């Protein structure tokens, strides 16, 4: 074990420091208050090798208390090409936005730097960039990563203007990167869903002028994209209803 102390500059900067200090062939990220079963790394490594993949992913198990209920076995799938990042955006087939719950081969991090320009949703952006380098990914629905739920944690507080602006910046970056590729449709659906999420987060909070510029921009984009949203196969029916109500 090696403990590193540095001034708080956000999770991306901390992970970058860890990456530069790491020496192993495989890399894994774990948040400090979460829990892993003893066989976590062994199972993900075996899955990666069995499927000849450079990333092995599992599902997250949300829990409170000391530790989660042991996760049952679950089937695995192999994802290739655009299907990898499409599953990421949709959080489908065992893929989620987090850097935790995945095991990465070190080769994916060559000349890579974590996106420190945002402090929220940065793990999704990092995964989007990393998985673009990945030809094959293995994913299992096995809930091997214990994601502790703490009422006072940042993920359980209503996001402020800066956090929501980061969410939008990440969605914008993904949409721009996917333009003209086979992922453009999936990225557009993800982006529109993110606009609906930001709008709902603003509406849940007391009215504040701090949210006004962002909210106005989001509402404008929702109106402009409404026609496409209603015919988009990538958006669920309840999201289309939410768009109409908005």
Image: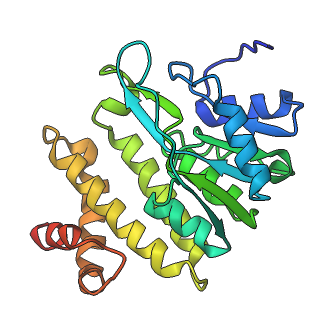
Q: Would residue 138 appear left or right of 211 to someone viewing this image?
A: right
Q: Is residue 58 left or right of residue 50?
A: left
The answer to whether 31 appears left or right of 187 in the picture is right
Viewer-proximal residue, 53 or 130? 53
Specify the quadrant of the image occupied by residue 53. bottom right
Percent position of residue 124, x then y: 54, 51
Q: Quadrant of the N terminus?
A: top right
Q: Quadrant of the C terminus?
A: bottom left
Image position, residue 227 (x, y; %) = 24, 86
Residue lying farthest left?
A: 245
Give the colour scheme shown. Answer: rainbow
Q: Quadrant of residue 16?
A: top right
Picture coordinates of residue 200 (x, y %)? 21, 52
Q: Residue at x 18, y 67 (%)?
A: 238
102 to 31, vertically: above or below: below
The structure residue drawn at horizontal position 84% and vertical position 45%, both measured from the top left corner, is 106
**Residue 202, position in %: x, y?**
22, 47
Among the 4 quarters of the image, the one containing residue 114: top right
Q: Seen in the image, is 181 located left or right of residue 169?
A: right
Residue placed at 66% from the left, 18% from the top? 7
Total marks shown come to: 0
Relative height, residue 204 to residue 185 (above, below): above
Above or below 234: residue 137: above
Residue drawn at x 89%, y 31% is 23
């Amino acid at each position: 074990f090696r403990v590193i102390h540095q001034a708080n500059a956000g999770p991306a900067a901390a992970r970058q420091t860890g990456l530069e200090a790491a020496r192993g062939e495989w890399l894994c990220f774990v948040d400090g208050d979460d829990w892993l079963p003893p066989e976590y790394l062994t199972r993900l490594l075996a899955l990666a090798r069995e499927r000849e993949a450079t990333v092995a992913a599992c599902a997250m198990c949300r829990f409170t208390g000391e530790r989660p209920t042991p996760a049952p076995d679950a089937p695995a799938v192999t994802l290739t090409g655009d299907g990898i990042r499409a599953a990421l955006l949709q959080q489908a087939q065992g893929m989620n936005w987090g850097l935790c719950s995945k095991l990465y081969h070190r080769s994916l991090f060559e000349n890579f730097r974590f996106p420190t320009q945002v402090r929220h949703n940065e793990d999704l952006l990092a995964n989007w960039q990393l998985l673009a380098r990945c030809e094959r990914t293995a994913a299992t629905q096995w809930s091997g990563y214990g994601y502790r739920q703490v009422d006072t944690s940042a993920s359980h507080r209503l996001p402020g203007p800066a956090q929501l602006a980061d969410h939008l910046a990440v969605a914008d970056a993904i949409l721009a990167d996917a333009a003209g590729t086979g992922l453009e449709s999936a990225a557009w659906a993800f982006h529109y869903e993110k606009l609906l999420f930001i709008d709902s987060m603003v509406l849940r909070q007391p009215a504040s002028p701090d949210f006004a510029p962002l909210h106005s921009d989001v509402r404008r984009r929702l109106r402009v994209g409404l026609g496409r949203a209603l015919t988009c196969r990538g958006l669920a029916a309840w999201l289309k209803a939410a768009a109409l109500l908005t």
